[in-house]
Image (spheres, rainbow, N blue to C red):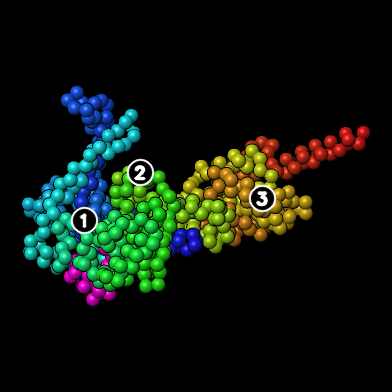
Amino acid sequence: MYEQLIKTVTNLGSPKVLVAGDFMLDVYIYGDALRISPEAPVPVLKICRTEYSCGGAASVAADISALGAISICLGVIGDDPNGEILMDKLTETGADITGLFAAAGRPTISKQRLIGLAQHRHRQQLIRMDQESTEPLSDEQYEKILHAYKERLKQVNIVCLQDYNKGLLSSSLCKQMIRLAAQANKKVLVDPSLTSDYSKYSGATVIAPNRKEASTTVGFEIKTESDAARAAEELAEKLGLDAVVITLDKEGAYLKTGKISELIPTRPRSVYDVSGAGDMVLATLAITLASGCDYKTAVQLSNITGGIEVEKFGTATVTIEEVVNEITSQNQDIIGKIREIDRLADELNWQRRQKKIIVFTNGCFDVIHRGHIEFLRFCKQQGDIVVVGLNSDSSVKSIKGPDRPINNQHDRGAVLAALDTVDYITIFDEPTPSNIIKKIKPDVLVKGQDWTDKGVVGREFVESYGGKVVLAPLVEGKSSTATIEKMKALEKSSSEQSNR
């Protein structure tokens, strides 16, 4: 399964996602709590810094951009400094903000949090202050939004409605947006508001409420998996949905489709801050479904991105690289560091697209000694990803003779895999690594200085595309052959003494 997840997440492409909803600015004011006020039993904050981030629908747009897709924003902000800051933050992410309209007399929705710091580092939210208007828009403003929606619907692959019940996504507008998307054969994903009436979302493709939101609308508390199944079934039938995804915190998410009724589990997390988790789930579902993923895979990936997000402070984005690292770390016991060359080449291509420098070296690594450790440490200093081409047992025999290797390829690979300086290992049967060098196309090829006169295999190929060859210094007197000969001499001396 992990192989499919990695393949999927690294091939999502750049679908265009229309994000319509309540755009917000999150403000974090950090201050050192140095003393208690003499006026009242409350901490006094000495302000250190102020940070701004995207919230609400803006958070969804930022998440979409961070995952490599294109977010197209549609909503209302205030004609005020906070609106300008929010547009700047969205522009930094690469989002299209031409569909954000400034409404006179209406503030940009903002959530301002005071964060107390103890010893400059232990963060604790003390209070949140919201600035907003939840009044409906004017008829003229709704018409402007609907016109912009129609124009942008032609350009996108999928639609997200992020509803915080702040006045934009009225019942009438929601229904029109869903109807128009259906006519255009575009999926509509909804992150609903906390309300008991979901009728305005009827006909959407997917709805993704959290436990509390789903409980509120179905009229019973969702405590168990069977409760979630019952709620999802009710929502799917009542609203005519293609799928329901109820997020259940540390338990994962319950998925209901025409063919699936299943709890998709997630890894338990050390939750730091849940703000923004629902935005991340919606963004991930949108990108994966727009890229052609099935619902189960989409939910599995949204579990992962949502899980990474809650371990961060505040509303934070997640990158594809973080998702790949998470999948890899979760399955490290299964995956390990040893790869077949074709699969390794695919993974390295993705790493290269992330601007990582690929370093390659090769050898028998039969009896690991200090010289090997220093050599591999040198390799790691040359780039980001170190790949070791390990001679197979048959390859070692052809080079070193019938008595070698001392340790078989599985044991040698396991020892190398335990080293932090080694990221990947691939085993090859040929006498030279020429073929795997051509498949890996390393940025840096490293060999020991003893290869100066022998000629480094792969040098011409690596240098032909701008790569470089580096010769590593050797540790005097350290080699597998020398170690083995010393062991043989000790064994012979011990045997002679015992025969006396």
Q: Earlier in the sequence, mark 2 or mark 1?
A: 1
Q: Residue at x 32, y 48 (%)?
A: 274
Residue 369, picture quadrant: top right
Q: Are marks 2 and 1 in contact (CB under 8 Å)?
A: no
Outermost residue toward the right in this view? 500
- Classed neighbour count for the residue bearing mark 3: other residues with Cα under 10 Å, few (<14), some (14–19), many (≥20): few
Question: In which quadrant will I find the C terminus?
Answer: top right
Residue type, label 1: Tyr
Q: Position of residue 347 (x, y in %)?
A: 49, 58
Give the labeled residue for mark 2. 272
Rounded to the nearest angstrom, the CA distance separating label 1 from label 3 is: 56 Å
Residue type, label 3: Asp
Give the labeled residue for mark 3. 411
Disc number placed over residue 164 in the picture, else none: 1
Q: Residue at x 53, y 52 (%)?
A: 332
Q: Which residues are magenta?
A: 174-190
Q: Residue at x 18, y 47 (%)?
A: 110
Under circle 1, the secondary element is: loop
175 above or below 6? Answer: below
Q: Position of residue 80 (x, y in %)?
A: 12, 48
* Side of 252 relative to 439 (left or right): left
- Classed neighbour count for the residue bearing mark 2: other residues with Cα under 10 Å, few (<14), some (14–19), many (≥20): few
